[in-house]
């Protein structure tokens, strides 16, 4: 082995031996407007959407703090507005046309997820909470989601129904 390559390999081995587990630094999530409400699909432990370990919830959006978020916004039926004012993020959910939003969460806290269906009527299920948690709290919440059970998907007393998709 060449001296430079050997030095780099030794340095890398030393760094890898003392480095803590990699933190959650990015995440994929899908928000779907349907039936005048939101469905949120989180990538499971494998970090990929549309696999057997995904978790799906209704209404409230939970995200880990200090994380780059890749959010896919879609609609199954109508045109919906979607806004996270605290993060300066907004777009439309349009049937048949996914929109991809990228942003970064910073501090833990609770703020509003603002939504509306473009018919002019108010639909309370489109108004929800954005709950940004410390990464370890988010991981714990995600791991606690159970098939067909009530989840910890709450903020300020609000509850959500959680289920794992079949498969």
Image (cartoon, rainbow, N blue to C red):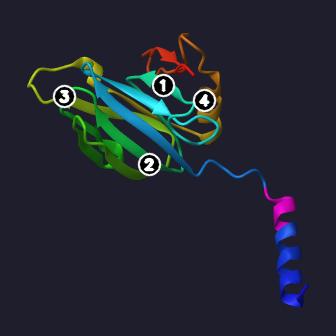
The secondary element bearing badge 1 is classed as: strand
Count of numbered circles on the image: 4
Please tell me which of labels 4 and 2 falls first in the chain.
4
Residue identifier under label 1 = 56
Label 4 packing within 10 angstroms: few (<14), some (14-19), many (20+): some
Residue occupying the point 55% across, 41% down: 48
Q: CA distance from mark 1 to mark 4?
A: 10 Å
The mark lying in front, picked from 2 and 3, is 3
User: Is residue 16 or residue 52 the one in the foreground?
Assistant: 52
- Numbered range of the magenta stretch: 14-19
Residue identifier under label 4 = 53
Residue identifier under label 2 = 70
Determine if the magenta segment contains residue 16.
Answer: yes
Percent position (x, y) of residue 23? 66, 50
Image quarter in which the N terminus is found? bottom right
Q: CA distance from mark 4 to mark 3?
A: 28 Å
Residue farthest front in this picture: 167
Q: CA distance from mark 2 to mark 1?
A: 16 Å
Residue occupying the point 50% across, 21% down: 153
Mark 2 touching mark 1, by CB under 8 A? no
Picture quadrant where residue 10 is located: bottom right
User: Is residue 154 or residue 103 the one in the foreground?
Assistant: 103
Label 2 packing within 10 angstroms: few (<14), some (14-19), many (20+): some
Please tell me which of labels 1 and 3 falls first in the chain.
1
Percent position (x, y) of residue 77? 22, 26
């Amino acid at each position: 082995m060449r001296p430079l390559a050997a030095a780099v390999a030794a340095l890398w081995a030393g760094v890898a031996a003392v480095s803590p587990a990699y933190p959650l630094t990015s995440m994929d999530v899908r928000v779907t407007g349907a039936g005048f409400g939101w469905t949120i699909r989180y990538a499971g432990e494998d970090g990929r959407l549309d696999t057997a370990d995904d978790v799906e919830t209704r209404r409230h959006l939970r995200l880990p703090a200090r994380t780059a978020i890749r959010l896919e916004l879609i609609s199954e039926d109508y045109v919906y507005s979607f806004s996270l004012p605290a993060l300066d993020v907004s777009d439309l959910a349009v049937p048949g046309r996914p929109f991809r939003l990228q942003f970064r969460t910073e501090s833990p806290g609770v703020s509003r997820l603002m939504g509306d269906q473009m018919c002019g009527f108010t639909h309370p299920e489109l108004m929800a909470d954005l709950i940004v948690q410390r990464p370890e709290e988010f991981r714990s919440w995600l791991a606690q989601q159970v098939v067909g059970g009530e989840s910890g998907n709450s903020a300020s007393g609000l509850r959500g129904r959680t289920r794992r998709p079949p498969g």
